[in-house]
Image (cartoon, rainbow, N blue to C red):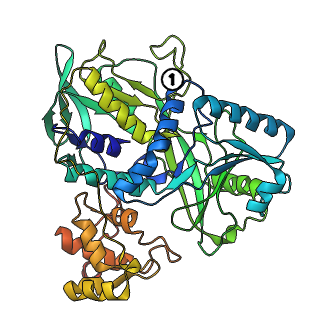
């Protein structure tokens, strides 16, 4: 969402600064997003979620074309296995129609089993949404931010907001750990920490964000038990444990949905992973977890909007908060509680921010020099032999394979480190080039990547981080250990 807002604002003659406390974009909720572009049938009628979801979904084809990212509108299915679940998907069908989701239909047991033969024999029918799709959420966020930077947006990484400066109840500056930045407007797109930013801005309420943890399991791409996006029938709390393909050829199972208190707790648990397996097998009984190659957890921003006796009490519970609360604090656009379907909604939310700023007096002149395209360099492994040879002749580093599973070269890693949105850690490179995502899970490439990061960033190997801050791989050199023993 933050990346797409930055890109939308870069279309205008404005000075735009993105303040990010992480060492990269897409390191919060986005990094563990399922990557599904929801159709919009699940959100309550009339809610911000419904409006933004359906509009955002419709924007994805053009967005993907401009940013040159992979996007597949493969459709999704909600599977009913009982009479009560049949009633639920019929309700979802009617809700989706009211929300404006096109071409929804319920397909019978015979048809869905023909499409997905490994589905449970208990299957009675399925709701089919042809506009559902899948995308690489991290790739989308990075591409949008790179496009924004190339169009004049400034990005400050490792910069944390700790307060605001106000004059006559209007925000005039943002205080951070790296100085004070003066501004006319602030857009709060802080994800899990949006409630903290609200309070720093002076919005006092009972609204708070508690993380909802979701655990996932990724399967080896050699194992393909499904062909599409399969949801169980949802509950009020969650869309349930789904089984889906991904943009990278894997199958993903998850997530769980558990409220926790720690906004940084991304640990997996034995009970959570067991729940993922059990839930996955309700849809695909033959699901073979021996093909699991990765487990991880992510956190989404579950807000308690709708609480009684609070300024947000009239809102739909757990709806997106989208407001310009000028009666409380001026110069502030507030976006909070953006959970699922936040990914699908993000292009529409970016549109909404632009219109909200216009309506509240910000002069916005279209930039003639705006370039909507971000043309990525093709992965070395996808080039023809002739193209590879030419690239190696120009830069021999492209002839050195660093990650064997994904066929990633040293040249690509160096290019990512010095990109418009730089990759400053191992995981930042992983997010762009998918190193360490194959069967060996980084066992082969990690030492070499540490060497490259050390050389290109001009830091000692012990300062190279896996991700974020204080996640160094190495404690000291082997020689130093020998010296201490002597």
Q: Is residue 71 above or below residue 455?
A: above
Q: Is residue 238 above or below residue 405?
A: above
62 lies left or right of 178: right
Residue at image coords 72%, 52%: 279
| Image quadrant containing the N terminus | top left
Q: Nearer the viewer, residue 23 or 26?
A: 26
Q: Is residue 295 visible?
A: yes
| Image quadrant containing the C terminus | bottom left
Residue tagged by mark 1?
Answer: 305
Q: Is residue 400 visible?
A: no
366 lies left or right of 193: left
189 lies left or right of 343: left
Residue 120 x/y as whole percent: 81, 57
Residue 138 x/y as whole percent: 41, 55
Question: Neighbour class for label 1 at 10 Å: few (<14), some, many (≥20)?
Answer: many
Residue at image coords 62%, 47%: 256
Residue at image coords 26%, 76%: 452
Q: Is residue 291 above or below residue 302?
A: below
Q: Is residue 166 above or below residue 433?
A: above
């Amino acid at each position: 969402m933050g990346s797409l807002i930055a890109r939308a604002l870069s279309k205008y003659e404005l000075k735009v600064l993105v303040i990010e406390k992480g060492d990269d974009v897409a390191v919060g909720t986005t990094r563990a997003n399922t990557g599904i572009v929801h159709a919009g049938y699940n959100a309550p009628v009339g809610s911000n979620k419904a409006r933004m979801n359906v509009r955002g979904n419709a924007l994805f084809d053009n967005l993907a074309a401009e940013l040159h990212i992979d996007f597949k509108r493969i459709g999704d299915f909600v599977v009913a296995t009982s009479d009560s679940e049949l009633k639920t998907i019929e309700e979802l069908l009617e809700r989706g129609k009211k929300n404006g989701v096109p071409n929804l239909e319920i397909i019978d047991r015979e048809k869905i089993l023909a499409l997905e033969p490994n589905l449970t024999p208990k299957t009675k029918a399925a709701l089919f949404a042809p506009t559902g799709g899948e995308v690489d959420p991290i790739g989308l966020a990075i591409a949008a931010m790179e496009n924004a930077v190339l169009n004049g947006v400034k990005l400050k990484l490792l910069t944390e907001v700790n307060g605001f400066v106000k004059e006559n109840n209007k925000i005039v500056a943002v205080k951070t750990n790296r100085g004070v930045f003066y501004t006319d407007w602030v857009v709060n797109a802080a994800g899990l920490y949006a409630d903290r930013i609200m309070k720093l801005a002076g919005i006092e309420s009972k609204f708070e964000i508690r993380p909802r943890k979701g655990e996932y399991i990724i399967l080896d791409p050699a194992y393909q038990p499904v062909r599409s996006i399969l949801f169980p029938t949802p509950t009020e709390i969650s869309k349930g444990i789904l089984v889906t393909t991904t943009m990278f050829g894997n199958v993903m199972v998850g997530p769980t949905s558990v409220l926790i208190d720690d906004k940084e707790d991304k640990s997996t648990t034995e009970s959570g992973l067991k729940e993922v397996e059990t839930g996955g097998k309700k849809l695909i009984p033959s699901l073979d977890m021996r093909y699991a190659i990765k487990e991880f957890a992510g956190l989404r921003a579950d807000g308690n909007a709708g609480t009684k006796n609070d300024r947000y009490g009239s809102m739909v519970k757990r709806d997106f908060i989208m407001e310009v609360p000028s009666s409380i604090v001026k110069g502030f656009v507030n976006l909070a509680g953006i959970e699922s379907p936040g990914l699908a909604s993000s292009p529409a939310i970016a549109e909404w921010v632009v219109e909200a700023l216009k309506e509240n007096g910000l002069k916005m002149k279209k930039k003639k020099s705006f370039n909507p395209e971000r043309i990525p360099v093709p992965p070395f492994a996808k080039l023809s032999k002739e193209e590879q040879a030419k690239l190696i002749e120009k830069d021999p580093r492209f002839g050195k394979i660093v990650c064997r599973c994904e066929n990633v070269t040293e040249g690509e890693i160096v290019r990512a480190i010095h990109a418009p949105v730089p990759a400053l850690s191992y995981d930042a490179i992983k997010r762009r080039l998918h190193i360490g995502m194959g069967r060996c899970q980084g066992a082969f490439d990690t030492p070499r990547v540490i060497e490259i990061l050390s050389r290109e960033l001009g830091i000692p190997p012990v300062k190279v981080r896996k991700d974020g801050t204080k996640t160094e791989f190495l404690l000291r050199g082997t020689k130093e250990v020998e010296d201490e023993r002597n």
